[in-house]
Image (cartoon, helix red, strand yellow):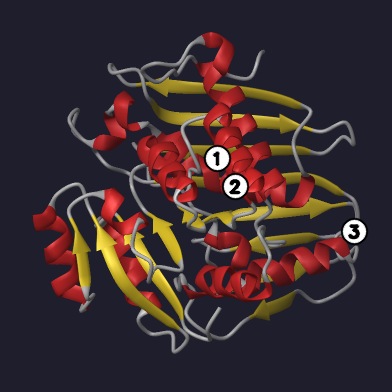
Amino acid sequence: MSKTVRWGVLATGGIAASFTSDLLEMADAEVVAVASRTAESAKAFADRFGIPRAYGDWAGLVADEDVDVVYVATPHSAHRAAAGLCLEAGKPVLCEKAFTLNAREAEELVGLARGRGLFLMEAMWMYCSPVIRRMVELVRDGAVGDIRTVHADFGIAGPFEAGHRLRDPAAGGGALLDLGVYPVSFAQLLLGEPDRVQAQALLSPEGVDLNTGMLLGWDTGATALLSCSIVADTALTASVTGTAGRIELPRGFFHPEGFVLHREGREPEEFRVEGRRDSLQHEAAEVMRCLRAGETESPLVPLDGTLAVMRTLDAVRERVGVRYPGENREELTPA
């Protein structure tokens, strides 16, 4: 692959705009095409960012021979179809989170990518953050001892009207897949897949979760207390406490400027990394590094980890009674 990686962007919403804007600031990246369900939307996006080709359907983008990798930024209810179409056409994929609606769909995408030897990665930008990576290094080096508790929350106040996609079961609405994926991914980055899952939620009249609390447990004795909400502005903080210390991450824990390590008998230590805390360039750089190295999976965002998170999200939904159209009980993780 040439030094410059040529991107195609599939979808034209807010996150697609943010990612495209960040890509355009990278010297080794080029956005060559964009696709939407309508030609008007694709053309408007292309004009806004100076993208040379705009497609009014997904098929045109995945057939474009100049596209090296596709960024899938549709709502997660369309991730299986969009990413699957790209992989079937032989295109590597970076797919937004939540990765899919459920673990079954995620397993299908991972199986397709592995079967064809194609790169696939969830766009969990938190895992690519230099600050989060430094935190993980410290934890693995024993800075806090054996982990005993993890806390994390992600809530926004709303309110969202009944017609909004966050209230729409057909769009995979609710707090869990949009926001709860961050606290769950944070906990599992440190502790792996839990052995037990408990959850409680306030559901909307449409049947999606508005406010959800989760208690995850591991056979080591570690626990994670997590929450997400689309009806309450929570602190958006996280902490990791072990037998030898504690790490606290400030508001915006999923893209922090730094964190503080507390250890008994020592002054608090602050760790900071220079650069934009909200940049999506870190995940883009990891994708391009993998493509140039011929790697089909990222060690920072491994597919097995993505599948484990999806199984946990399934388990939470099974416990609180959220199912999306077309799902049945057997498709979610058993209680």
Q: Residue furthest left?
A: 40
Q: Position of residue 296 (x, y in %)?
A: 66, 59
Vertical comparison of 35 with 105: above or below: below
Q: Position of residue 176 (x, y in %)?
A: 47, 35
Depth check, mark 3 against mark 2: the one in front is: 2
- Density class for disc 1 (Cα within 10 Å; few <14, some 14-19, many ≥20) is many
The amino acid type of the residue labelled 2 equals: Ala
Residue 161 appears in which quarter of the rendering?
top left
Nearer to us in this view, 195 or 151: 195
**CA separation, marks 3 and 2?**
41 Å
Q: Residue sitting at 84 percent across and 52 percent down?
A: 242
The amino acid type of the residue labelled 3 equals: Ala
- In the picture of the structure, the residue carrying the numbered disc 3 is 244
- First in sequence: mark 3 or mark 2? 2
* Quarter of the picture holding the C terminus: top right
Q: Is residue 122 left or right of residue 155?
A: right
**CA separation, marks 1 and 3?**
40 Å
Q: Residue sitting at 66 percent across and 30 percent down?
A: 215
- Disc 1 is placed on an element classified as helix
Nearer to us in this view, 32 or 186: 32
- Density class for disc 2 (Cα within 10 Å; few <14, some 14-19, many ≥20) is many
- Density class for disc 3 (Cα within 10 Å; few <14, some 14-19, many ≥20) is some
Q: Residue furthest top?
A: 329
**CA separation, marks 2 and 1?**
6 Å
- In the picture of the structure, the residue carrying the numbered disc 1 is 109
Q: Position of residue 267 (x, y in %)?
A: 80, 77
Please tell me the numbered disc located at residue 113. Answer: 2
Res 15 seen here: no
Q: Residue sitting at 90 percent across and 51 percent down?
A: 146
